[in-house]
Amino acid sequence: MDYLRTVVPSQLTAERGSNLVVINPGSANVRIGFAHQQVPFNVPHCVAWHLKGQDEGPRRTVQDQMLNTQATATQTREREKAYDIIASLLKIPFLDEEAASNSFPRKLGRVEGYAPHQSRSDTTFAWTNVMEKNPKLSVAIERSEHNAGEKDSLDSAGTRGKGPHTDECKFKEFIMGEEALKIPPTAPYCVRRPLRRGHFNISHHYSSQQVCEDLSAIWNWILVEKLKIQLADRNLYSAILVLPETFDSREIKEMLSIVLRDLRFSTAVVHQEGLAAAFGNGLSTACVVNIGAQVTSVICIEDGVALPSTNVNLPYGGEDISRCLLWIQQHHQTWPPVHTNPMNKPVDMLMLNKLKESYCQIREGEFDAVAVVNSFDQEHVASHKTRLSALNVPPMGLFYPTLFVPEEYPPPPRSWFQDNEDMLEETWHMEFPRRPDMPDSFYPSGNGGLNMWDYHIFPRRLKKDEKLGLAEAITNSILSTGRIDLQRKLFCSIQLIGGVASTSGLVAAVEDRVLHAIPSTEAIDTVEVLQSRSDPSFVPWKGGAGGLDKKRGPHWKWQKVQGFLFSPGSSNVLLQHPIVY
């Protein structure tokens, strides 16, 4: 126990090497892998459970399918206004002008059997096989056929062709990852996403117990199927949880309980996603902008320490760009006359994400492209060759978020997040290192509780604003540090991570719009986005893994890190020691 209280992450990495697993959960995907791997396994964060007793008829459901996704009249006006502002900047026709001025036929017609490789994006998916052999019946049939005579065998073979032996197969109990998103609509399965918009997806229809069980099932499946770590051997491994700043204290506790109690890891270290991202690119000071699938987060790092007062979380991301892409095509009547519903049909969102990644970019001028889209109705898949228009508009919604109409979810019982037990209860009376540039009032003097990430007491966090654009969020985050020397350094050290960070033209757009968002009263005239050293989607995971490099070794050996080390307790998961060095 003394070892667990004093060990630091670099020491843990050096000693446990191949037995160290890094887990970086996100709303849409979870990245898991050994710390010594170059890249992790990137798996959609969802599971489809078989609905027993509902094997007949179109019983396919999604846990969130009852949500309201219709835009109100006010939202529609704001969306159309945002489109016209973006159109003016990009020098393309306004929303109503574009449809009227187009004389050429947009829709090129339906193409059955169109070769997917002819398109820049392969959006054709094969349905997931939801059946598996029934072990008991298969063994009984094999024994029967082995003991029967030649004549009886021929008779039974003829009988099998008529159907009685279809009982040899049964529905799979669960299906994980991308396969869960491609289940035929008629199959009796319920698709669940345990995380939504950076939080547990808890509602009156999805209990906290179900969320935790699904998280445990998904992570355990990846550990067994991808990393080949059986449950019996899990006590030989340690885990590093790289968690987004959006999670509440109780959510972090629950995930630690899953890792230590359910998945049976021996120890677990928790790191902030923004901090790990900086280390993943070899930086000690940076403004980290994480544009994920459903949430965009901004946080500033100074000398290897995250500044909690600079954290801004925005409720939009890559999936909102994909839905906006669909809205624009439907408005301009360039989308095939098919029913595409990314909220109730996960395979539709999968297709839209592929189209967004392949075609959307930020650039001036009219930008259209010919692509192949698919309709997934019942068990039939049809291909349509279509001209997509205004492909440079959707990603600009990051700067004008009213272009995105956020989907509505059943409100979670917020009382679930009211956690009176503080994770730092054993460290209330610890003497924290004091920085000379921070007044004494910023440090705790009593035994009041601290937020999970608040090692020091900073000014109140910036207020969350769903209509705050990315450029304003970055500017406000950096200016909230209050020091001109640090501000200048941060404006020249902006780091874009997340899947959307790979969008062509985004870097130049961020630099330009952030520069114009800085008030004229501030003595700052330079903004620079640093190039990522690796895939932006995996940078936080790589930083959580210690940024292992054959030449340099773990980044943790030469950079400051802050995190927490946990080990299993009696009944609760308690903090053993805060690591700040």
Image (cartoon, rainbow, N blue to C red):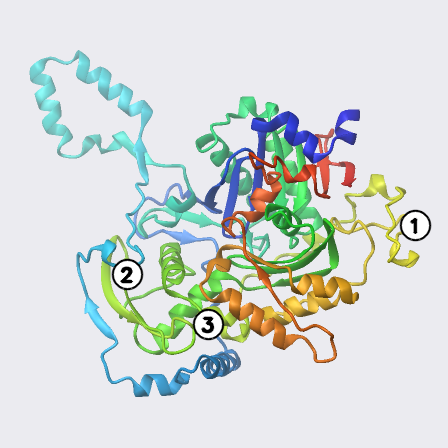
Camera-side residue: 170 or 129?
A: 129
Q: Is 354 placed left or right of 450 in the picture?
A: left
Binning the other alpha carbons within 10 Å of mark 3 as few (below 14), some (14 to 19) or many (20 upward) gives: few
Going 92% across and 56% down the picture, which residue do you hit?
440
Residue 420 vertical placement versus 82 (above, below): above
**Where residue 383 appears, x then y in whole percent?**
23, 60
**Location of residue 168 by image quarter:** top left
Label 3 or label 1, whichever comes before in sequence order: 3
Residue 305 makes an appearance in the image: yes
Look at discs 2 and 3 and give the one toward the viewer.
2
Look at label 1 and name its amino acid. Answer: Gly
Q: Earlier in the sequence, mark 2 or mark 1?
A: 2
**Percent from the top left, x then y, of residue 183?**
34, 48
Task: Please name the residue shown 59% across and 40% down the image.
Answer: 547
Q: Is residue 449 above or below residue 518?
A: above
Q: Which mark is residue 446?
A: 1
- Report whether 350 appears left or right of 443: left
Mark number, residue 378: none
Residue 66 in view here:
no
Q: Tell me the element at label 2.
A: strand
Q: Are marks 2 and 1 in contact (CB under 8 Å)?
A: no
- Marks 3 and 1 sit apart, C-alpha to C-alpha, by 49 Å
| Position of residue 169 measured from the top left corner of the image (x, y, whole percent) | 28, 33
Please state which amino acid type lies under the numbered disc 2. Ser
The residue singled out by tag 3 in the image is: 70
Residue at the limit of the structure toward the front, as seen here: 551
The secondary structure type at the circle numbered 1 is loop
Point out the image quarter for the N terminus.
Answer: top right
On the rendered structure, is 441 left or right of 196?
Answer: right
How far across and how far down the image is residue 210, in percent?
55, 44
Could you tell me which secondary element the residue under label 3 belongs to?
loop
